[in-house]
Image (cartoon, rainbow, N blue to C red):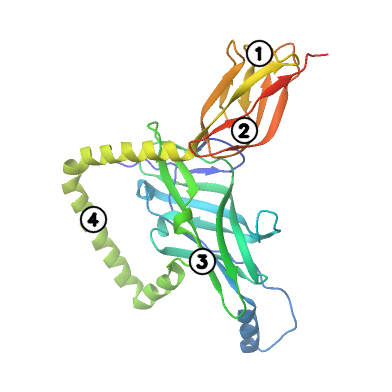
Amino acid sequence: MNKRILWLGLSFLLVAALVLTSCGELLPAKQGEPAGQAEEPGEQEEEEEEEVNFRFWVSDEANVIDDFDELWVTITQIGMQQGGESGAWIEHYLDPAAKVDLTKLKGDNATEIWSGKLDNGTYSKVFIYVSNVEGALAGGEISLKLPSGKLQISKPFEVTSGEVTEFVYDITVVKAGNNGKYILKPQIAQSGPDKPFNDIASEEKKGKEKGEEEEVEEEEEEEIEEEEVEEEEEEEIEEEEVEEEEVEEEEVAEELLGTVAGTVTDASDEPIEGASVVVEGTELSATTDGNGGYEIDDVPVGTYTVTASVEGYQSASQENIEASDDTTSTVDFTLEPSA
């Protein structure tokens, strides 16, 4: 079956759905070292190495990444929160940005996108900011859901003197629902400072040492063998794959989608029927019933602004509304008459 290769570059803002075709390879980028006095090459390298006590790696849990030929994710910023909820955020902009091909980072494969020095202590949260995605999909268009370009996880870790903390941040792509949509999200269970990983840069170097010609021949032979096996098994496992995908889609939909609900009333606490309630930055909305009630389902996990409006009244908005997995967030409005 011929593959249609679909190329698309996407900028991630606070949106609920983005159209994408993708899969690919990582081009690591590191933060530049601070300028200093000129030293002998060996001495300078030793000093710079001593200054590094934290390395930030990106990896990808397999899931449905094999649906793609390439999936390039551009990461422009990372951040780590010191201490608890009120702790300060340490943020680093990557210049140049790290362009990661998730298809090359399956399983324990990982690539370093930043290394440097952090203050000793406890850190509670980590985020990466995805500014762009582009890639190629094997067969047809799909859409990718992402509450925002900022992917944040709670994963405590320690930075201590005399040790280098190797933190692996795992990103994965999963199917959601029965409409062919995909979701790009962090994989908390596979992230952290204690996760095993294979440095693909090191592996690539070893491969080159073995000889480029031998490597190409081995890859071609493996691809031919895999294609032959896939063709032989495709008809036998097709029905089983469909059933498994349906189960996975239902589980992902339940895990990643929440509900926003509430009532819209006037200043006399009387319900307002026909008011429009919108989750800003998405195409999700609802209209209030005779009791002033509304409910918006399938809201991707994230933080939103929700707005209520109706003719004859001033519109009202509530910010920082959290949509959580399989949870209903209550957002009530009281609208004032228009002047």
Return the x and y of residue 191 as percentages of the image width and height. 48, 59
Indicate which label's residue lies in the foreground, 3 or 2: 3
Q: Do the residues under discs 3 and 2 have CB atoms within 8 angstroms?
A: no
**Residue 281, labelled with which disc?**
2
Crowd rating for badge 2 (residues with CA inside 10 Å; few <14, some 14–19, many 20+): some
Pointer 4 residue = 226
- Residues under numbered marks 3 and 4 in contact, where contact means CB atoms less than 8 Å apart: no
Q: Where does the image place residue 185, in percent across and percent down from the top left? A: 49, 47
The image quadrant that residue 305 belongs to is: top right
Label 3 vs label 2: CA separation? 34 Å
Q: How far is the residue under mark 2 from the one under mark 1?
A: 26 Å
Answer above or below: position of 88 versus 268.
below
Q: Alpha carbon of mark 3 to alpha carbon of mark 1: how far?
A: 52 Å
- Residue that mark 3 sits on: 193
Upstream in the sequence, badge 2 or badge 1?
A: 1
Looking at the image, can residue 114 be seen?
no
What number is the disc on residue 271? 1
Label 3 to label 4: alpha-carbon separation: 34 Å
Image point 71% across, 15% down: which residue? 269
For label 3, the SS is loop
- Residue type at mark 1: give it: Pro
Element under label 2?
loop
SS category of the residue bearing label 1:
loop
Q: From this viewpoint, which residue is outermost toward the front?
A: 269
Taking depth in this image into account, of 75 and 157 the one nearest to the observer is 157
Query: Identity of the amino acid at label 2?
Result: Gly
Of residues 89 and 268, the one drawn nearer to the viewer in this rendering: 268
